[in-house]
Image (spheres, grey):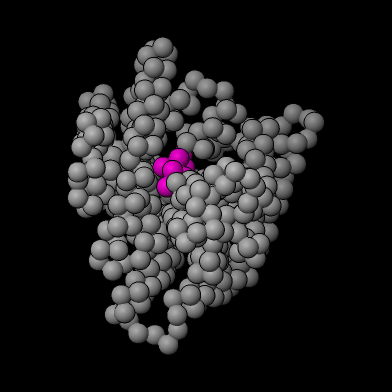
Amino acid sequence: MRRQALGAVAGAVVLTLPWIVMWLTGTAGGLSTGATVAVSGISVLGASFLLAWGAETAEKDVPRAFAIAVLAVLAVAPEYAVDALYAWNAGVFAGTERGIEAGNLAVANMTGANRILIGIGWAGVALFTVFRRGSSADPAVEKRDGFLADAVTLDRDIGLEIVFLLLATLWAFLVPFGGGIDLLDMLVLVGIYVAYIAVIIRGDVEHEEGQVGVPAYLQTFPRPYRAATVLFLFAYSGLMIFTAVEPFAHGLEELGQSVGIPSFFMIQWIAPLASESPELIVVVYLVNKARSTAGFNALISSKLNQWTLLIGTLVVVYSLALGRYGALPFDQKQSAEIWLTAAQSFFAIGLLINFEISVREAIALLVLFLSQVLSEFLLIREVLVLPISDYQLLLVFTGVYMALGVGLFASRRHAFGGILRQSAGTVSDAFSTTDHPRRAD
């Protein structure tokens, strides 16, 4: 394990070295746009791995309440860095065309990251779980008769996360009606996450399992060395993300414009891939070790983090840059993007309320995601000619997701009722004055 862990850490550090050398020597500005995007993006990728490993290693030493609250923020830090950059620019250049575009790009990156996590993350990991070699030895995989009927079963304790994710999703449908992401959105969305944290802390709800890979090895260090290692990983990865995210994001804008692709499309779909990739790779690693339940728990928890903290705090960054309180503005197109993202989340939750996802359901989730992205891209490039605008296309896919989601909730209403009762019991136990037993995975 030692050799593999050290090799993985060394590999992640190597990914960051070209950028840090160019940044320290001041030669980064002389790169072409494509080279800047490649070098800075790879650096963000490597830094994301280091940040994740540092956060998971730190869980051994910090108080549990602190670990849950703070490490959850670290989990969305790479995605948040890009969003915060554009939210800040929207405030600095408020009232100008550049400020309006920055606000739209902040929303585009946020919606893209969330849809990638479900459309590629949830669907792709489900398919990998079933079809990988050795899946027959995974207790989470159920072989069933029928066309693409094999399924991945989920931990039933994840019902609490599903309920809180549904609450955030339902509120997200209302966000565009407020004229921007405002203080009320922050209070509700961050409040949902704080309430979730309070329940799992007071209720002693524990989903974490023993670490594997790099964090498992680093946790064997003596405490002083372990603490020093964690601090180094945090500081180094934070420096990489802080210095590389702006040239990476702006380079993507320029690269897209040079080939006739709008900036928002590049920021929405390409930028999140760099920050989401480490998490997806870690989940695939867990699945490959027959720990599918832990992998899916991580994906669902990550979606809850992004769908609450990532959206809710953008107004804070925007207001700080503005110098006063203000709602982060966005245009009609981004309203449709938010509705579509919420609708996809609603449909995906409907798939999971019976605590399993079949192969055909995962394929449906993946195909819907890819068809929407591809259709919009072809429409932008004028390869595909439709009698509707790209805004109307987003509304069509929103309607499809909603219709499918409503059908799932209706057909699985008994399972959904069970989740609600289970979660209500967990919340009641958490805030009761009597002692309550720990929920076990």
Q: Who's the residue at 19% across and 45% down the image?
A: 31
Q: Is residue 236 above or below residue 227?
A: below
Q: Who's the residue at 49% across and 52% down the image?
A: 93
Q: Is residue 35 magenta?
A: no
**The N terminus lies in which quarter of the figure?**
top left
Q: Is residue 37 above or below residue 123?
A: above
> Can residue 140 be seen in this snapshot?
yes
Nearer to the camera, 153 or 250: 250
Q: Is residue 80 magenta?
A: yes
Q: Who's the residue at 41% across and 22% down the image?
A: 231
Nearer to the camera, 126 or 97: 97
> At which x and y percent is residue 429?
73, 38
Name the outermost residue toward the right.
Answer: 433
What is the span of residues highlighted in magenta in the rendered image? Answer: 75-82
Q: Is residue 132 above or below residue 298?
A: below
Nearer to the camera, 12 or 263: 263
* In the image: residue 61, left or right of residue 16: right
Residue 27 figure quarter: top left
Nearer to the camera, 175 or 218: 175
Q: Is residue 230 above or below residue 38?
A: above
